[in-house]
Image: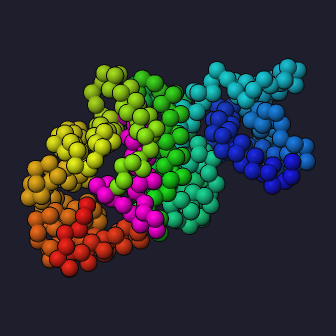
Amino acid sequence: MTATPTHRTIDAVWRIESARLIAGLVRLVRDVGLAEDLAQDALVAALEQWPSSGVPDNPGAWLMSVAKRRAIDAIRREKVLERKHEQLGRELEIERGTGVADFDAAVDGAEVGDDLLRLMFIACHPVLSTEARVALTLRLLGGLTTPEIARAFLIPEPTVAQRIVRAKRTLADKRVPFEVPGGDERAARLSSVLEVLYLIFNEGYSATAGDDWVRPALCEEAMRLGRVLAELTPREPEVHGLVALMEIQASRLRARVGPSGEPVLLLDQDRGAWDQLLIRRGLAALERAEAIGDARGRYVLQAAIAACHARARTAEQTDWPRIAELYRELSELVPSPVVELNRAVAVGMAYGPAAGLELVDALAAEPSLKEYHLLPSVRGDLLASLGRLDEAGTELARAASLTRNNRERELLLRRVEDCARGRVPTR
């Protein structure tokens, strides 16, 4: 095996095993920063040794064994955690005597799932800023490097690095415990985890800036983590609801982009290009969420809305009255100007553009939507449907000036041109 394929193998192993490796190490050393450093040391050792020695039969167990030895060295240097030193030493002696059957055994297999869940809760802890939670989750649970995270979100590498360093320092300073919270705190912390996963997904589904309309790799990472979370928390309906929502929305990714990378809006998409496997998986996840029997939360409701689109074989068959009702239910559960804007779109499709425009105009003075490009975009669409093309063009031009995504800006400007030529832009 040459060095290049070996390095590719190491990269693949790291992507698969890094989260479990770091999670197991955090349980042992009780420090996120130290655990990641130990895992990175093990990765460096693999890069140094595997090209010549070959990839071991159980690469995950090899990495954990090396990391544990480095943990003992660190503990010796610091002259702290004597009991942990003895525990790690005993584990290494057992491994030397019996061998490690698999990676789960290397990290105490009975606790692997709990460790991963603890790591999700600590990476998404509310004590951290939203940006820090996203960066730390992608780093610790996604195995992404700092440059990869920076490229995904179009921000400078030093910014990402600082967020990660500060996040780990904050967790240490605040002495955030490595645990799965219980009671009311569990619900709040789980909500934070779901928020982070959906933020990552949405940045991939509809990039906020740059030249790409979609970034599928981010969607795939969010879905992977969502599926892991669903396995670890099988009785949480909102987890299954989020998985359902992401699966159904991701089914449209191929259809959302035209031959030249241009955006294709929902009603113009070739539904034959939608991924039916992802739709089936999403609908099954929605059924699991609803079968649990609890009141529907924000993600279950949004998944139900996505399911209405997925079940419609043509745009004309979409059950817009049902979607409008689901948005009404969502707005009562989670009052939000953005939800109201989406409800206005559904009402406009179900009951005519004048009804939708009335709801949009009621949001005109909302401070949080002042720089939100979708407000003038939606208003422009509704005005165009009413034949008020001059006003529509003005609104669409304003939307184009507000968006930071170049592809979306091009689309909006083409719609402005349609209005100027007396044509109603398609939606």
Q: Is residue 230 above or below residue 9?
A: above
The residue located at (87%, 25%) in the rendering is 96
- How far across and down, in percent of the image, does residue 365 sit? 16, 63
Q: In this view, does 385 lie to the left or right of 166?
A: left
Tell which residue pokes out farthest to the right in this image.
52
Q: How is the image coloured?
A: rainbow
Question: Per the image, is 315 magenta?
Answer: no
The answer to which image quadrant residue 104 occupies is: top right
Quadrant holding the C terminus: bottom left
The answer to which image quadrant residue 15 occupies is: top right
Q: In this view, does 137 lie above or below 160?
A: above
Q: Nearer the viewer, residue 214 or 150?
A: 214
Number of numbered discs visible in the structure rendering: 0
- How far across and down, in percent of the image, does residue 257 sit? 43, 60
Question: Per the image, is 246 magenta?
Answer: yes
- How far across and down, in percent of the image, does residue 73 sit? 82, 39
Q: Would residue 9 be seen by someone viewing this image from the given angle? A: yes
Q: Would residue 239 be seen by someone viewing this image from the given angle? A: no
The residue located at (24%, 64%) in the rendering is 426
Q: Is residue 212 above or below residue 59?
A: below
Magenta-drawn segment: 241-268
Q: Is residue 319 above or below residue 283?
A: below
Q: Which of 273 and 118 is in front in this view?
A: 273
- How far across and down, in percent of the image, does residue 234 sit? 46, 24
Q: Is residue 274 left or right of residue 323?
A: right
The answer to which image quadrant residue 68 occupies is: top right
The residue located at (39%, 63%) in the rendering is 263
Q: In this view, does 27 lie to the left or right of 225?
A: right
The residue located at (20%, 79%) in the rendering is 421
Q: Which of 307 and 215 is in front in this view?
A: 307
